[in-house]
């Protein structure tokens, strides 16, 4: 009996151990599989980024010669543009139509923002942000780099970013309050102060330990001040300060100076006084709202991210942009001085994409870069995501038309690059490559739309000094074979029926001759002959017709044959 019981006990233990081992192995295998999937996703994104952002092949215009004398026309295909891309293309058409007809330049931001109504909330918010950030007064300068690096312009970018973040937060508080009216207990005189009070009924429903200096109407003083400032209403914050001034010491005087000063900057004497008070009495204070307000007004202790208060990325951005300073007074210690360049580097290089989980929230990282005036990096990032590419391109077009875009000097550069001689941290966007990569998807099926985008390159030249618009049109015509539609055609009476290209230029001969030459080099002799005829170049027409007719002269002429078609073509040319 003893032996039997021992045996049963051992078997039970062994089976439990075996079961546990199997479960552990299964969990390890599942964990390994998930890790592999995450790793593969990251590798895939890196490869896609590399393919899009580097190498010269994306702008390789060289074509292999085709052996046939006569080009074969493909069947017209369906549009390759989806509904959002088509909506953008329509707006670009409207914009270019005004430009070529000599009207006042329309607002491209508004035209593109109208498309956002068809799409989702993220796109609407993106265009609202682009509109806010580009609504700046530009200084006279010879190029975009001088404009973008000018201190006044950089200061205005920061002001506009803060306005956007404040208005967004105010909208968020509205939505929160009106979504919880019973808990919010909204009442009193309409305004930011009452809105913040109601918001705090939801945000801080129970007393929070460690908050200091009492309350105003049942809410912590510093929380009220902070959230009024966060909504961009310093008058409402001042209302709270006045009601609690007896508990706040010198703060009322400092806040008044801050509120009425140019660029929200205290005088050096006041700033030093506030910073000294902060270091001695507040650095380890238990009230996070009080610390945050002091750090904003005094632009001090930039290493403290105030994570207890600024728990969202937008709050963190707002806090840090409030601490950015531009004038180098020489008196600030490193822990009290944050420049825009330092903050930009921190977000783009030190934190980078991995910190912001870009696969889950691409618009958040785009917002982070765009609101810190890193427009080119933001566009290049968004462009890498296939379904967001059209939005990135149109943001680039808006900046380009406003002369705010920093473009690469060479077309063989990566999509995003830093050029020798530029200030540290400055990135340039290869605008030509961006447009070419975008239009490649639809240039063969939607040549009219592609032409509208190429028109933005009319003042660009390639490395050989050739106009990029001419070059792109030439390639487009050869690729799409829409010779008549784009370049026009000759009527029986010898007059030329205009093509789409006539909208963009009054002198079409250089383009037609260029396309004819490209067609000839490619071996499309029949199309080249028609184009030289269109460009009124009879010598080339005769030369090519001789080449075309020589091989078919001995052949028997039958209906629909090459010989019959070429004979009719030769007759029509001769009769003109």
Image (cartoon, rainbow, N blue to C red):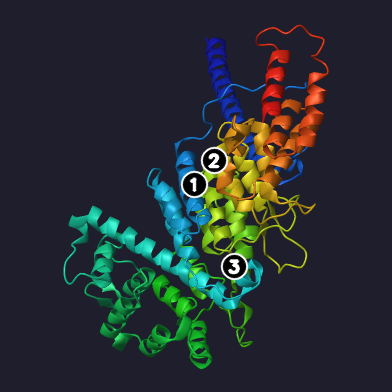
The residue closer to the viewer here, 454 or 571, is 571
Q: Disc 2 designates what residue?
A: 449
Q: CA distance from mark 3 to mark 1?
A: 38 Å
- Could you say whether the residue bearing mark 3 is in a helix, strand or loop? helix
Q: Nearer the viewer, mark 3 or mark 1?
A: 1
Q: CA distance from mark 3 to mark 2?
A: 40 Å
The answer to whether residue 466 is above or below residue 233 is above
- Could you say whether the residue bearing mark 2 is in a helix, strand or loop? helix
The residue closer to the viewer here, 111 or 571, is 571
Residue at 69% across / 11% down in the picture? 561
- The mark that comes first in sequence, 3 or 1, is 1
Left or right: 447, with 314 as reference point:
right
Residue 143 image point, x, y percent:
65, 69
Q: Tell me whether circle 1 and circle 2 mark residues in contact (CB < 8 Å).
A: yes
Q: Disc 1 designates what residue?
A: 93
Q: Is residue 69 visible?
A: yes
Using the image, tell me which numbered label, if any, was put on residue 343.
3
Label 3 Cα neighbours within 10 Å, binned few <14 / some 14-19 / many ≥20: some
Q: Tell me whether circle 3 and circle 1 mark residues in contact (CB < 8 Å).
A: no
């Amino acid at each position: 009996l003893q032996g039997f019981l021992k045996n049963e006990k051992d078997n039970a233990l062994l089976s439990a151990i075996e079961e546990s081992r199997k479960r552990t192995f299964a969990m390890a295998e599942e964990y390994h599989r998930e890790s592999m999937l995450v790793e593969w996703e990251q590798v895939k994104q890196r490869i896609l980024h590399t393919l899009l952002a580097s190498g010269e092949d994306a702008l390789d215009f060289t074509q292999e010669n085709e052996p046939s004398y006569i080009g074969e026309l493909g069947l017209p295909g369906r549009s390759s543009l989806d509904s959002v891309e088509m909506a953008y293309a329509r707006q670009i058409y409207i914009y270019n139509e005004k430009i070529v007809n000599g009207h006042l330049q329309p607002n491209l931001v508004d035209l593109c923002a109208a498309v956002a109504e068809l799409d989702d909330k993220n796109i609407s918010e993106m265009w609202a942000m682009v509109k806010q950030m580009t609504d700046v007064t530009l200084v006279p300068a010879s190029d975009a780099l001088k404009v973008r690096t000018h201190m006044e312009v950089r200061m205005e970018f920061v002001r506009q970013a803060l306005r956007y973040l404040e208005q967004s937060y105010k909208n968020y508080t509205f939505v929160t309050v009106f979504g919880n009216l019973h808990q919010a207990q909204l009442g009193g005189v309409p305004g930011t102060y009452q809105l913040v009070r109601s918001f705090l009924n939801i945000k801080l429903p129970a007393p929070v330990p460690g908050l200091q200096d009492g309350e105003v109407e049942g809410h912590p003083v510093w929380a009220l001040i902070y959230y009024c400032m966060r909504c961009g209403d310093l008058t409402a914050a001042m209302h709270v300060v006045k009601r609690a001034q007896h508990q706040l010491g010198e703060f009322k005087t400092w806040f008044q100076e801050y509120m009425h000063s140019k660029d929200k900057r205290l005088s050096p004497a006041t700033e030093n006084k506030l910073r000294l008070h902060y270091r001695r009495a507040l650095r380890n204070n238990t009230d996070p709202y009080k610390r945050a307000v002091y750090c904003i007004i005094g632009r001090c202790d930039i290493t403290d991210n105030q994570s207890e208060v600024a728990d969202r990325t937008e709050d963190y951005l707002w806090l840090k942009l409030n601490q950015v300073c531009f004038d180098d007074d020489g008196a600030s210690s490193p822990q009290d001085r944050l420049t825009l360049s330092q903050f930009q580097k921190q977000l783009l290089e030190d934190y980078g994409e991995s910190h912001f989980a870009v696969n889950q929230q691409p618009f958040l990282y785009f917002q982070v870069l765009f609101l810190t005036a890193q427009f080119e990096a933001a566009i290049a990032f968004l462009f890498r995501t296939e379904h967001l590419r059209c939005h990135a391109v149109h943001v680039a077009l808006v900046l380009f038309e406003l002369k705010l875009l920093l473009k690469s000097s060479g077309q063989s550069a990566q999509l995003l690059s830093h050029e020798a001689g530029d200030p540290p941290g400055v990135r340039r966007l290869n605008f030509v490559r961006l447009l070419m990569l975008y239009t490649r998807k639809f240039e063969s099926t939607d040549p009219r739309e592609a032409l509208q985008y190429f028109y933005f390159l009319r003042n660009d030249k390639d490395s050989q000094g050739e106009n990029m618009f001419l070059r792109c049109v030439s390639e487009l015509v050869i690729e799409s074979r829409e010779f008549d539609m784009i370049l026009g055609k000759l009527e029986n009476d010898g007059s030329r029926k205009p093509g789409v290209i006539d909208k963009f230029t009054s002198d079409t001969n250089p383009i037609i001759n260029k396309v004819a030459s490209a067609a000839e080099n490619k071996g499309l002799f029949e199309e080249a002959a028609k184009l030289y005829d269109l460009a009124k170049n009879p010598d080339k027409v005769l030369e090519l017709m001789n080449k075309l007719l020589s091989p078919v002269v001995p052949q028997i002429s039958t209906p629909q044959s090459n010989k019959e078609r070429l004979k009719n073509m030769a007759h029509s040319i001769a009769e003109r």
